Amino acid sequence: LLSNVYLPTPKNIDYFWCFGSLLLVWFVVQFVSGFFLSSFYLPSVYFSFDSVDCFYREVLFGSFFRSVHSIGASFFFLFIYFHLFRGLYFSSYSYVSTWLVGCLILVLSMAIAFLGYVLPWGNMSLWGATVITSLLSAIPYFGSSLVEWLWGGFSISSPTLSRFFVLHFFLPFILAIFVFSHILFLHVSGSGNPLGINSKGRSLMFTPYFLINDLLGFVVCFIVFLYLVVYVPFFQFDSSNFDEANFLSTPLHIKPEWYFLAAYAVLRCVPNKLGGVYFLFMFLFIYFLIPFLVSSVYIVPLDFFGSVFYFMFICNFVLLTLLGGLPVESPFVSVSVFSSFLYFIYFVLLLDISWLDYVSMIRL
């Protein structure tokens, strides 16, 4: 805490730098609300749905804690995406250790959220888990055996829910270690700034100036969050998840939570299973490669074409998210293929533009 109080912070940072502290606050919210939920959960195909329903109806403040946990996950990923894309825009990948740990936090958060999505045992939870875990069968030689080992049988059943529940409870502790490491590396390297220059001689103490800045962002987000929890707690739920899991009833199309839709659109636009798994893997792994491929001296806001390509990339990411929630039919599949191509081509353009900018700086 004292290190945060005396942390030198660049004086020219803006509100886009408050998402890191918001993520820390929402991580604690998810941790605490998840602890209360786990106290009443029964990991069984016979009792999971009823235990969640009983917690919501019968337990004091049960509906409140469940809404906090489910909507809190959406806010958590919204802040993660803002934090990630802000770092991409202002070249935060030049702080290699901090960036790589942040990417690990993103991947682990997605894994935890997927496990949590399965646990309520609604119909969409069952079929979403079946589709995603079946992707492991694309691994040559031992993929099918790996899927059966993960399921604990020939289909998703009580052993699967038990394993998912244990992992969903345990992995946040691992995530907390990564969060601590992320903050530690940030203290060592120092915070970035919009200009991308060394700001050690132009810094202010984090407290009280930037603490007030972060508190203002927290108050605004908390008001919106509390409104959604109290007045529209089911706005993000799929209607299929209000029905108990049924092995004989398949939804019209599998639709995960909104924060997975962009990756899901990339996955299903490839007709081959192994190819889809490969592009899904690259959808996330490409962020790990950026610090080693893109010039660290390149600052997107200072380059007109770089800024144009970046905002086209953001619009395309939103389009991928929308496409991931639509049925697998024409013309959505064709648009998904084109949009996925644009997603990956942006990083090629970023690589080319950054090194051209670096070469021109050397010549000057």
Image: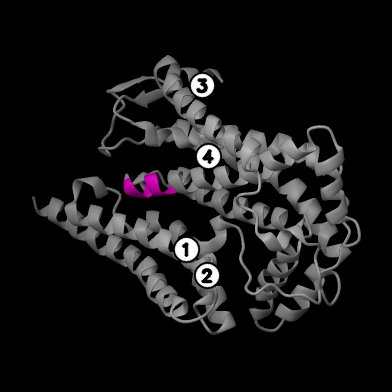
Magenta-span inclusion, residue 85 = yes
Q: Nearer the viewer, mark 4 or mark 1?
A: 1
Residue 243's x, y, as percent? Answer: 77, 62
**Residue 63 is drawn in which quadrant?**
top right
Task: Tell whether 169 sits left or right of 88.
Answer: right
Relative to 109, say whether 19 is above or below: above
Q: Nearer the viewer, mark 3 or mark 2?
A: 2
Residue 106's x, y, as percent? Answer: 55, 51
First along the sequence among labels 3 and 1: 3
Residue 191's x, y, as percent? Answer: 39, 33
Cα distance in 3D space between marks 2 and 4: 36 Å
Q: Which residue is mark 2?
A: 326
Point out the residue furthest to the top here. 208
Q: Are marks 2 and 1 in contact (CB under 8 Å)?
A: yes
Query: Which of 32 and 237 lies nearest the eye of the viewer?
Result: 237
Mark 1 surroundings: few (<14), some (14-19) or many (≥20) residues within 10 A? some
Mark 3 surroundings: few (<14), some (14-19) or many (≥20) residues within 10 A? few
Q: Amino acid at mark 3?
A: Ser
Which residue corresponds to the image point at 28% horizontal and 23% vertical from the top-left? Answer: 201
Q: Which residues are magenta?
A: 84-89
Q: Which residue is mark 3?
A: 3
Quadrant of the rendering where the N terminus is positioned: top right
